[in-house]
Image (cartoon, rainbow, N blue to C red):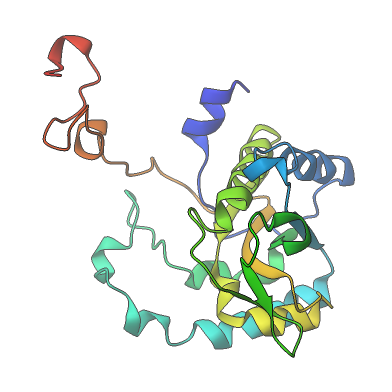
Amino acid sequence: MNVFDAIYGLRATRVYEDRAIPPDVLTRILESGTRACSSGNTQPWEFVVVIDRERRRQLQDMLSTAFAPIDAERAQRKEQLVDSTGRPVTGHAAIENLHNVAAIVFVFWNPDRGIRMQGEYEEKPDGTLRSTRPIPGGRGSSLFPACQNMMLAAHALGVSSLFTTFFGLCAAEVKELLHVPPRMFLESAVFLGYGAEPLGKPKRKPLAEVAHLNDWEIPYAADPADRLG
């Protein structure tokens, strides 16, 4: 699959078959994550890959409880949270089907590799770290490209995926369950598996609505003849 086919065809999948990913395929996907660019080439990611069925059930219960109050806090209206086929795109379906996800890749930021500036963090008595100064781009600037790499690689290999930050709602519990050191930061997770839901064409805003040329007041035009800059 060429890179543009992978980019244009990538979809967020929330419902999965109960089917394992072959070990060699899973390894290729994870290795693709390690090929991402990172701040100062620090490669501050740590992946905890959960394939055990019972552990997935525990994570599902944990996330269901943490996610319960979210609907009342949403800024979007219910009718905005659907795709072009009317399929809901909230986290409910993902959580309800989490036990069928073949692999959940938890993505942690490791400060032992990621800290770039003196005094950026201080350690608290419980072993966790607290940020003491703003970090342009945040920790995700190094981790999210790794997640996108994994998702594109998965799509090219016939594996569906979902990027999520849901587990941030219960990060402490996740870290305890997975025996992750307190000083590590849980930033995101990637679901991997074989999709079991029909996916229509994604809704995407046209480029002219979201891109600007040289000035905010000038919309970017895909056709050079239509550009005003």
Query: Picture coordinates of residue 138 (x, y %)?
Result: 53, 58
Q: Which residue is at 63% across, 67% downward?
A: 119
Compared with 49, 147 (above or below) is above
Say whether residue 82 is left or right of residue 157.
left
Q: Which residue is at 75% across, 42% downward?
A: 34
Query: Picture coordinates of residue 153 (x, y %)?
Result: 68, 36
| Quadrant location, the N terminus | top right
- Which residue extends farthest front? 118
Q: Which of 137 and 96 is in front in this view?
A: 137
Compared with 210, 69 (above or below) is below
Q: Which of 226 and 164 is in front in this view?
A: 226
Res. 216 visible in picture: yes
Query: Picture coordinates of residue 122 (x, y %)?
Result: 66, 76
Q: Which residue is at 33% across, 84% downward?
A: 72
Say whether residue 39 is left or right of residue 43.
left
Say whether residue 140 is left or right of residue 217.
right
| Quadrant location, the C terminus | top left
Say whether residue 205 is left or right of residue 194.
left
Image quarter of residue 94: bottom right
Image quarter of residue 170: bottom right
Compared with 45, 65 (above or below) is below
